[in-house]
Image: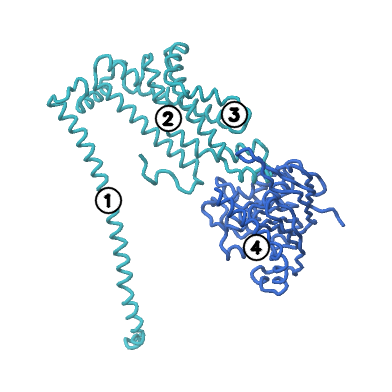
Amino acid sequence: MSEPAIELRNVTKRFLTPSGGIYTALRDLDMQVAPGEFNAVVGPTGCGKSTTLALISGLEPPSEGQVRVNGRPVTGIVPNSGFVFQSDAVFPWKTVLDNVAAGPRYRGTSTREARKQAREWIARVGLAGFEDRYPHQLSGGMRKRVALAQSLITEPRILLMDEPFSALDVQTRTLMENELLGLWSLTSSSVVFVTHDLEEAIALADRVTVITAGPGTVKGTYEVDLPRPRNVAEIRFEPRFVHIYQEIWSDLREEVLVSYERQKHSAGAA
Amino acid sequence: MSVRSIRPARPEIATVAKALPAVAADSTQASARARSIRRRRLNVYALRVLVAVVWIGSWELLTRFKVVDPFFFGQPSGILQKLQTWTTEGTALGPLWEQVAVTMEETVIGFVVGAVLGVAVGVLLGRNRLLAEVFSPYIKAANSIPRVVLGALFAISLGLDLKSKVATAAILVFFVVFFNAFQGVREVDRNLIANARILGADNRRLTTEIIIPSALTWIIASLHISFGLALVGAVVGELFGATAGVGELIYSAEHNFDANGVFAGMLLLAAMALIAEALITALENRLIIWRPNPVGTDIKV
C-alpha cells in the first residue's frame, strides 16, 4: 500500500481550560487518509473533530503521538494545505479578487500574476463579475465560494474543511456540495471534511470516519462505495445510500446520545 | 385597429382598474411616510435652533439686565464683539490667524506624533506577549497619573516654544491610541489569523495585511477622541507658559478679567475641533470602505 497522505498515530490532544483545568479533546486517535481520498469525519458535538483538523494543518501541535502529512512529521503549518473554515474567514477588508489572490501572493507569486490566477478561480466558482466586491456585499453562499476559491487556488495536496457549509440554507448547501465535488474531481487533493451531518458525509466522501463523544477517538471507518460522479441532491434516495446510512448511524447514534446526556448534565449543573 | 377589436380585452382592463387603487394607495402611503419623515426632520432642526435662541437669548438678557454679572459670566454680544475686534484689529499677541495657526501646528504635530507612536507601540505589544507582560504594569502606572500635569514638566525641560506643547499633546494622544491599537490587535479574529497562516502569510504579512487592517476600526475610533485631546494638550501647554497661541490668548484674557475673551477663545477652539473631527470622519470613510455601515449614518452625540 502506498504511503498515506495524512496519518495520525496515537494522537492525544489536551487543552488548558481558562479555569486551569485540563480538557482532553482527543485520546489515542488513529486515522489514515490515502492520497486523493475524500474522508468525511463525523461525530457528535464537542468530540474534537475540529481539533483533528487543527492538528493536521499544523495550527496546533499534538500533546502526544504523531501527525504525518505526505510522509513527513508535522511541525508548524503544513505547506501545500488548504483550510476552509466553519465561520467566515475571508478577509473583510479585501475585495473578492484580493481575497482569492492572497494565497499565491503570500507564497511569493507577483501580485499581477496572482490576480490573473485569482480571476480564473473566481470564474470557476461562479463569481465572475464580483471581483471588486467586499465580502459584506455578498451572500453567505457567495462568501463560501470565495473561501473555496481562496483555498483551491493554491492547489493544496491536502484540503481540510471544517463544517464549511453548516451555516448555509439547505438549497445553497446542496449546490455548494455538488460544486465542491466538481472542483475536487479536477484535483488530486486528499480531503478531510468534518461535519456533524451524516447525510452530507456519505454523499460526499469515499470513506466516513466516526469519532466518539469527547475525548474523541475513532469508533469506526466505513467505505462509501457509491459511484462517482455523484449528484448530492439525488444520491440520498439510492438504496445503497440508505443502507450505508443505517449501518453508520447505528454506531453514531450511541455517541450522539452520550454527548447529549453529557450536555444535559452540564447544563443542569451550570 | 378598430374600436371594436379592443372590446374582448375589457375584462382585463377591469381587473387592472380594480388593482389600481391598491397600487395607488401604496404609493400614497409611501409618499405620506416620506413627507412625515421630512416634517420630522424639519421639526428637529427648528427645535435645535429654538434651543440655541433660548439659551443664548436668555444669557444675553440676563446679563443685559444685570441679573447675572457680565463681568464674571461674559455676554454673547460681547463675545461676538471680541471675536470681531480680534479678527479686524488683531489680538494683544498679534494677528488672530497667527494664534490659531500656532495652536493648530502644536495640535497637529502632537496628534500625529502621539498617534503614530501609539499605533506602533500598541501593535508591537499586542503582537508580542512577553513585551506586553513586561511593560503592562508600567503602562498602567503611567496611565493612572493625570498626564496633563506633565505639561508643567515639559515646559521646564523643553522650554516655552513648540516642543513642550507638542510633547504634552502627543502624550495625551499616545495613551488613548495605544490602548485602542493594543486592544484592536488582541481582538483580531483567530480564524482570520489561522486562515492567513495556512495561506502562507509570514509574520510581516500577518501584521500588515491582517492585524493592522483589522485593528484599524479600533484605532480610528480612538483618533476621534484623541484629536480633541491633542487640542487640550496644546492649550494646556500654552497655559503653562507660551508667547503665542489660542491657549495663551485665553490665559491673557483671564489675567485681564476678560470673561468675553475666554469665551471667544473657547469658541475658536471648538471650531478647530469640529473641523478636525469632520476631516477625521472623511479619512475614516475612505480607509474603512469595506465596512458594512459607513460612519455618519446614525445619530451621534
Q: Which residue is mark 2?
A: B227
Q: Does A187 sit left or right of A93 as displayed?
A: right
- Amino acid type for the residue under numbered disc 1: Arg
The 10 Å Cα crowd at callout 4, few under 14, some 14 to 19, many 20 or more, is: some
Measured as percent of width and height from the top left, residue B170 is found at: 47, 23
Tell me which chain the residue with mark 3 is part of. B
For marks 3 and 1, give the one nearer the viewer.
3
The Cα atoms of the two marked residues, 2 and 4, are separated by 51 Å
Please give the name of the residue rendered at 68% of the width and 38% of the height, measured from the top-left corner.
B202
Residue A177, numbered circle: 4
Colour pattern of the rendering = by chain
Hey, which residue is sitting farthest bottom in the picture? B4
Please report contact status of discs 3 and 2: CB closer than 8 Å, yes or no: no
Q: Provide the letter of the chain coloured blue.
A: A
> Percent position (x, y) of residue A109?
70, 44
- Residue type at mark 3 is Ala
Determine the secondary structure under disc 2: helix
Residue placed under numbered mark 3 in the picture: B132
Residue beneath the point at 63% across and 58% down: A123
